Image (cartoon, helix red, strand yellow):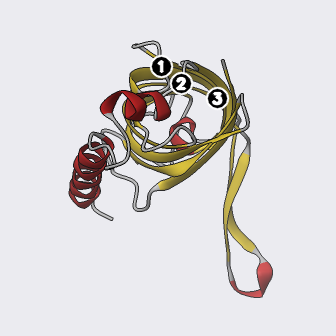
């Protein structure tokens, strides 16, 4: 999916969700609506698989306004495990094999959370990830580090009082290329 198409879909979805989140139902008053769609859990510590960290990561997420919705930021430290890339010729003999060492990543970004209800939330984010080492998946120019830009769209689900699950997609790009497909993301976190 081209990055322009992804950004257009993201912008249209965000504007539609923003419009519906701002309109209370006919049975709710404005005061009751704002009370039902927000709570006081403004921080989350989560374990994230894939997404902007390009592997596994531990991330901290905070809202700037003191509730669980609105503008916020997330940052973390990640780990990309060792992987082997190879090509087999005929009769099962490998023609080449590259072994890539494990890498550390540091994803940092801003995000905005909309909440049609207390349990169901939509998150839109943008940020950068620093990769300590070569990232041939996204950047074939640099060899000792890589800066990756990303935009993400996630669904957040509050499970119980403190558990938060997040699933979504991230579009990742570097100086030399845009990923051919969005990177899936899944996380499980503790909110407080």
The residue shown at (22%, 47%) is: 15
Compared with residue 165, is residue 147 higher up or lower down, i.e. above or below?
above
Mark 3 residue crowding within 10 angstroms, few (<14) / some (14–19) / many (20+): many
Mark 2 residue crowding within 10 angstroms, few (<14) / some (14–19) / many (20+): some
Q: In the rendered structure, which disc, 1 or 2, sits on the residue that comes first in sequence?
A: 2
Q: Which mark is residue 67?
A: 1
Quadrant including the C terminus: top right
Q: In the rendered structure, which disc, 3 or 1, sits on the residue that comes first in sequence?
A: 1
The residue shown at (40%, 54%) is: 179
Helix, strand or loop at mark 1: loop
Q: Is residue 64 left or right of residue 98?
A: left
Quadrant including the N terminus: bottom left
Q: Are marks 1 and 2 in contact (CB under 8 Å)?
A: yes
* Closer to viewer: mark 3 or mark 1: 1
- Residue 45 screen position, x and y as percent: 66, 22
- Residue 28 screen position, x and y as percent: 37, 41
- Marks 3/1: CA–CA distance: 26 Å
């Amino acid at each position: 999916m081209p990055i322009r198409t992804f950004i257009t879909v993201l912008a249209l979805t965000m504007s539609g969700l923003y419009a519906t989140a701002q309109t209370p139902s006919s049975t709710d008053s404005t005061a009751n609506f704002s009370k039902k769609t927000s709570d006081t859990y403004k921080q989350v510590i989560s374990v994230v698989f894939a997404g902007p960290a390009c592997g596994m990561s531990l991330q901290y997420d905070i809202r700037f306004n003191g509730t669980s919705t609105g503008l916020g930021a997330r940052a973390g430290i990640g780990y990309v495990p060792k992987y082997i890339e190879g090509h087999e010729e005929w009769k099962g003999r490998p023609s080449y094999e590259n072994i890539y060492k494990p890498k550390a990543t540091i994803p940092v970004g801003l995000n905005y959370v909309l909440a049609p209800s207390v349990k169901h939330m939509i998150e839109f984010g943008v940020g950068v990830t620093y990769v300590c080492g070569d990232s041939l998946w996204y950047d074939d120019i640099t060899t000792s580090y890589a800066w990756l830009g990303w935009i993400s769209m996630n669904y957040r689900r509050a499970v119980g009082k403190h558990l938060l699950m997040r699933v979504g997609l991230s579009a990742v790009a570097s100086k030399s290329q845009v990923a051919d497909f969005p990177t899936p993301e899944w996380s499980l976190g503790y909110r407080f």
